[in-house]
C-alpha cells in the first residue's frame, strides 16, 4: 500500500513497485526529485550551449562561458593543471548539490535531506580518492600505509580512512536536514500562533480566521533566505572543496 506523509510544507511519498526481474523496489520522493534535478540541469545545459558563436556572442553565451571559467579556476586552482580532467565531474557535483538544495524553495522534499544521496556521492568520491592513492604509491604501498607508523595502528588507520566519506556525507546531510526541520517547525508554530491569536476575535469572524494560517505567509520566506539559499550554496561549495582537496592530497601521498 502506498505511503504518504507530510512534514511541514513538504509532501513526502513512497511507492512500492514490483519489477519482474528485480523484485520490489521502492520509488521514493528522493528518487523522483533526483530525476527532476538531473532533468533541470540537462535542459539548462542544452539551453546555454545552443547557438554558440565565436564573435558577437550573446549574453547567454557569455554567462555560460563565465560558468566554465569559474569551474576551471576552482578545480585547477585547488588541484593543479594535471587535474583539469576533473572539471566536468566537480562542476556536475556542484550543480547537482546546488539544485537539490534549492529545489526545496518550491515546496518539495530536497534530495540532499536524505542521507542516501550524500552517501552515494561520498562513496564515489572515496573510490576516486583510493584510486589516486593506489596510483601514487602502488597497491602494496597503499596497503602498507595502514601499518604506519607501527602495525598496531592498522585498525585505527582503517577507521580513519573510512571516516572520510562518512564525515563528508554527514556534514552535508546534517546541515540540509536541519534547515528542512527548522522550516517545518516554524510553519507549524506560526500556524498554531495564527489560530490562537485570531481565535481571540469575537464571533464567527474569529472562528473563521483562526482556521487560516496567516502568519505562514511572508515570515518563512525570510528564513528561507538563510536556510535554503545561503546554506544550500555554501554546502554545495564546501562539499566540492573537500572533494578537490581530498583527491589532490591523495595524489601527493
Image (cartoon, helix red, strand yellow):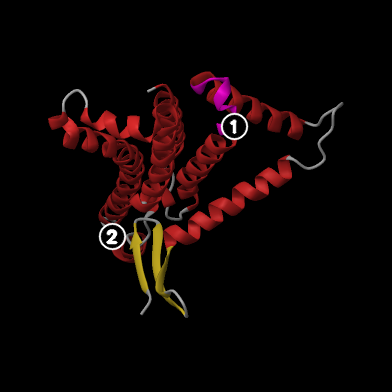
Q: Residue at x 46, y 32 (%)?
A: 240
Q: Residue at x 40, y 33 (%)?
A: 134
| Quadrant including the C terminus | top left
Q: Earlier in the sequence, mark 2 or mark 1?
A: 1
**Quadrant of res 146:** top left
Magenta residue span: 79-86
Residue 7 percent location from the top left of the image? 33, 58
Residue with the most extreme right position: 55
Q: Nearer the viewer, residue 60 or 168?
A: 168
Percent coordinates x, y for residue 214 in the rendering:
39, 52
Nearer to us in this view, 6 or 214: 6
Q: Is residue 74 magenta?
A: no
Q: Secondary structure at mark 1?
A: helix
Total label count?
A: 2
The image quadrant of residue 4 is: bottom left
Q: Nearer the viewer, residue 32 or 4?
A: 32
Question: Which residue carries the number 2 mark?
Answer: 202
Q: Report the residue marked by disc 1.
A: 85
Can residue 203 be seen here? yes
Label 2 and label 1: CA atoms lie apart by 69 Å
Mark 2 closeness class: few <14, some 14–19, many ≥20 residues within 10 Å: few
Magenta stretch: helix, strand or loop mostly:
helix
Amino acid at each position: 500500500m502506498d505511503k504518504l506523509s507530510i512534514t511541514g510544507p513538504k509532501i513526502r511519498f513512497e511507492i512500492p513497485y514490483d519489477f519482474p526481474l528485480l523484485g520490489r523496489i521502492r520509488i521514493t520522493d528522493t528518487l523522483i526529485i533526483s530525476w527532476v534535478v538531473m532533468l533541470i540541469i540537462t535542459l539548462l545545459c542544452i539551453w546555454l550551449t545552443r547557438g554558440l558563436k565565436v564573435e558577437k556572442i550573446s549574453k547567454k553565451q557569455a554567462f555560460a562561458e563565465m560558468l566554465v571559467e569559474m569551474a576551471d579556476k576552482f578545480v585547477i586552482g585547488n588541484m593543479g593543471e594535471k587535474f583539469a580532467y576533473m572539471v566536468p565531474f566537480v562542476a556536475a557535483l556542484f550543480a547537482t548539490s546546488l539544485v537539490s538544495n534549492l529545489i526545496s524553495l518550491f515546496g518539495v522534499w530536497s534530495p540532499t535531506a536524505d542521507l542516501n544521496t550524500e552517501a552515494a556521492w561520498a562513496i564515489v568520491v572515496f573510490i576516486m580518492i583510493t584510486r589516486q592513492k593506489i596510483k601514487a604509491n602502488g597497491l602494496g604501498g597503499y596497503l602498507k600505509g595502514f601499518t604506519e607508523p607501527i602495525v598496531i595502528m592498522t585498525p585505527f588507520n582503517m577507521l580513519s580512512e573510512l571516516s572520510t566519506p562518512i564525515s563528508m556525507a554527514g556534514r552535508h546531510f546534517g546541515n540540509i536536514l536541519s534547515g528542512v526541520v527548522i522550516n517545518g517547525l516554524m510553519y507549524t508554530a506560526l500556524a498554531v500562533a495564527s489560530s490562537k491569536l485570531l481565535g481571540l476575535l469575537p464571533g464567527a469572524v474569529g472562528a473563521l480566521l483562526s482556521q487560516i494560517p496567516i502568519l505562514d505567509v511572508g515570515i518563512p520566506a525570510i528564513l528561507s533566505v538563510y536556510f535554503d539559499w545561503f546554506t544550500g550554496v555554501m554546502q554545495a561549495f564546501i562539499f566540492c572543496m573537500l572533494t578537490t582537496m581530498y583527491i589532490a592530497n591523495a595524489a601527493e601521498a
